[in-house]
Amino acid sequence: MPPRRAHKKSRNGCDICRQRRVKCDEQEPPCARCFMRGIDCQFSRRSAMRQSSANSSVDCPAQAANSNAPIQSLEQRLNEAPASTLSTRLLELELLHYYSTRTYQGFALLSPDQGLWQVFAVEEALKFDFLMKEIFALAALHKATETPESALKYVTHALECQNEALALSRSALQNITQENSGAVFMFSIMTMVFAIVPPESVPGINFKSPLENTLAFFEFQKGTASLADLCKHWLGSGPFRWVFESKSSNNTVGVDDNFNAALTRLKELNNDYTTTNVSNPAIYSHAISSLSFCSIGSKGRIIAWLAMAGQGFMTKLKEDEPMALLILLHWAVLLETLGKLWWARNAGKRLVEDVAMLLEKVALRSSSCCGPRWAEAVGWARWKVGAGGGGECMMVVEAVEVAGEGIQRVPDSLNLR
């Protein structure tokens, strides 16, 4: 067994770091952690030790003179800090600024008050390290989607911060209180969003496939829903009361008659399918009803649909059941309406492409119960999100250019109006 690496253990950190039991750089005033958080920094123990030392060194002029040496400024300390430490701190300041000016806007649909994500989230992050690390992770991932030439640098830092955030959050999740409930709830939403970012949005980086991301997204949603229920008595009386209100915000979903007709066709296909293929048809009926509910009202409902569909539906989805995949395909069309949000950009389109190819493999070519209307439904979804056709759906998905007008219309076989 290799010998343990020697380390220095000090008890002379600032009052805040000692109280929070985190490592302090013991520089003043203030220490680096307190400076980053903009809070008052006191060294009560060191002041007491200095006073005791001053009283015992009256007869030692050299020591007394040394105790009056000027204290280094923060700028001097940063200039003398190791290059790696300085680089990390500057990157974190960059990411905090990026989050506060750009990244937070991706949560606008989740709350009627944008200040909740721009101001309150940062205030809570200054109190809880796990939330600050998650903010760094999200901002870095967002930066990676916007700067392809530096994507590797930012996504590497995003994954490092995400791992640190998850490790730091364990103790808070095991001991949720009124004080940390807001931070924990925001953390759960942010980690959920981190899971859905499409792989193509981060150039040169390979994450999971869109369908795998969706399954992981569902697991995060379950955790967030459980947390909201557990902390309802605290969250319901604060800035998160909107979560428990039934009234929709003005930020509503906009679907056309074409989508409503597609849902009608989906219900008909489900009725035919469940008569011979499913032992519990209520699973799919409930998922479709929830999908219809999510197509009206607040856009936040779209994100919540996976949790509404339920564990039974997700089990069928993991088993590649054709009807579960077809229902998910229609949700992906709704998800594409959130494309203006950085973390959902092209998420619906990529999921449609992934699920459509899987459907063509497991249903359209191998199942006698999935006839031409299934191909029409898949082709419609491809057309709706602007995805290319493929396999069995090529002929029904291809848009027809109207001669002399330079526009495209839906093929008659897909026109559901």
Image (cartoon, helix red, strand yellow):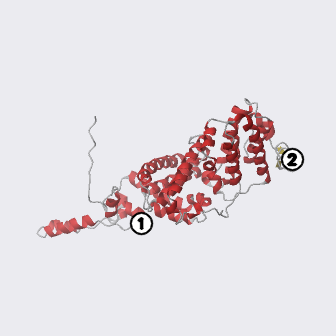
Identify the image quadrant of residue 180: bottom left
Identify the image quadrant of residue 49: bottom left
Asked whether 74 or 330 is in front, the reply is: 330
Quote the CA–CA distance across marks 1 and 2: 62 Å
**To which residue does mark 1 refer?**
38
**To which residue does mark 2 refer?**
402
| Residue that sits furthest to the top in the current view | 366
| Residue that sits furthest to the left in the current view | 59
Side of 48 relative to 17 (left or right): left
Do labels 1 and 2 touch, CB within 8 Å?
no
Asked whether 155 or 113 is in front, the reply is: 113
Disc 2 residue type?
Answer: Val
Where does the image place residue 36, in percent across and percent down from the top left?
41, 62
Mark 2 closeness class: few <14, some 14–19, many ≥20 residues within 10 Å: few
Where does the image place residue 90, in percent across and percent down from the top left?
44, 57
Residue drawn where x is 26% and y is 52% of the image: 9
Disc 1 residue type?
Answer: Gly
Residue drawn where x is 78% and y is 43% of the image: 268
Residue drawn where x is 28% and y is 43% of the image: 5
Where does the image place residue 330, in percent across and percent down from the top left?
71, 46
Q: Is residue 332 visible?
A: no
Q: Is residue 335 visible?
A: yes
Where does the image place residue 326, in percent across and percent down from the top left?
71, 41
Residue 244, compared with residue 266, is above or below; it is below
Side of 243 relative to 8 (left or right): right
